[in-house]
Amino acid sequence: MIEAGADDYIVKPPSINILNARIKALHRRANPQKVTVDFEDYGHLMVDFSKRKFSILGNPVKLTEKETELALYFFSRVDVLLSRAHLTKVVWGTTPDIDTRTIDVHVSHLRNKLHLLPQY
C-alpha cells in the first residue's frame, strides 16, 4: 500500500492510543496552524490581533463589530484568496446561498476607514 501512495497504515486490531495519535497527526497535517502574533505592522496601519484594535499612524480607528471581524479575518489570511460565499459563511455565520452585497459594502467601508485605497 505504501508504494501505491499511502503514507501510513494501522495494524489490526488497532490500539486506541495509537489510533487517536494517528488521527490527531493527520488532522495537524491537514489543518496547519498559523503562527499567532499579537500585532502586525503594515506601514501606516497597525493591527493588534489580541486586543482586536486597528490604528493608523498611532491614531485608533473605530470599526463596527462586523467590520472588525472581517478585517481580522482578512489580516490573519493575507496570502489567501477568500470568496464572498466563504466570508458570508465564516464571518456572518449564514448560508452563502443568499445573494447580497453585504460583503462588498463592508469591504468598501474597511478600505476607506483603514486607508487601503490607492490615494493613500
Image (cartoon, rainbow, N blue to C red):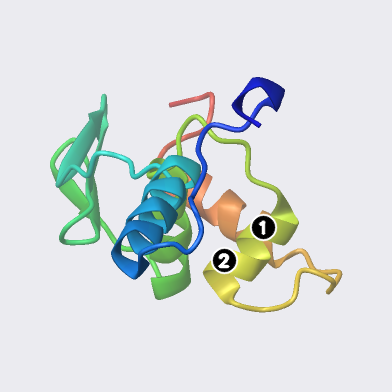
Quarter of the figure with residue 103? bottom right
Instruction: Determine if residue 7 is in view.
Output: yes
Say whether marks 2 and 1 touch (CB < 8 Å).
Answer: yes
**Which part of the image, by quadrant, shows the C terminus?**
top left
User: In this rendering, would 91 be left or right of 83?
Assistant: left
In-front residue for pair 3/52: 3
The type of residue carrying mark 2 is Val
Residue shown at the point (54%, 67%) measured from the top left = 91
Residue 29 drawn at (x, y percent): 43, 41
In-front residue for pair 31/49: 31
Residue with the mark numbered 1: 86
In-front residue for pair 73/22: 22
User: In this rendering, would 4 be left or right of 40?
Assistant: right
Residue 8 drawn at (x, y percent): 50, 37
Quarter of the figure with residue 56? top left
Residue shown at the point (22%, 36%) measured from the top left = 40
Residue with the mark numbered 2: 90
Residue 5 drawn at (x, y percent): 66, 26
The type of residue carrying mark 1 is His
| Residue placed furthest toward the top | 3
In-front residue for pair 37/100: 37
Residue shown at the point (24%, 61%) measured from the top left = 52
Instruction: Determine if residue 114 is in view.
Output: no
> Disc 1 on helix, strand or loop?
helix
Residue 95 drawn at (x, y percent): 74, 76
Residue shown at the point (44%, 52%) measured from the top left = 27
Circle 2: is it few (<14), some (14-19), or many (20+) Cα within 10 Å? some
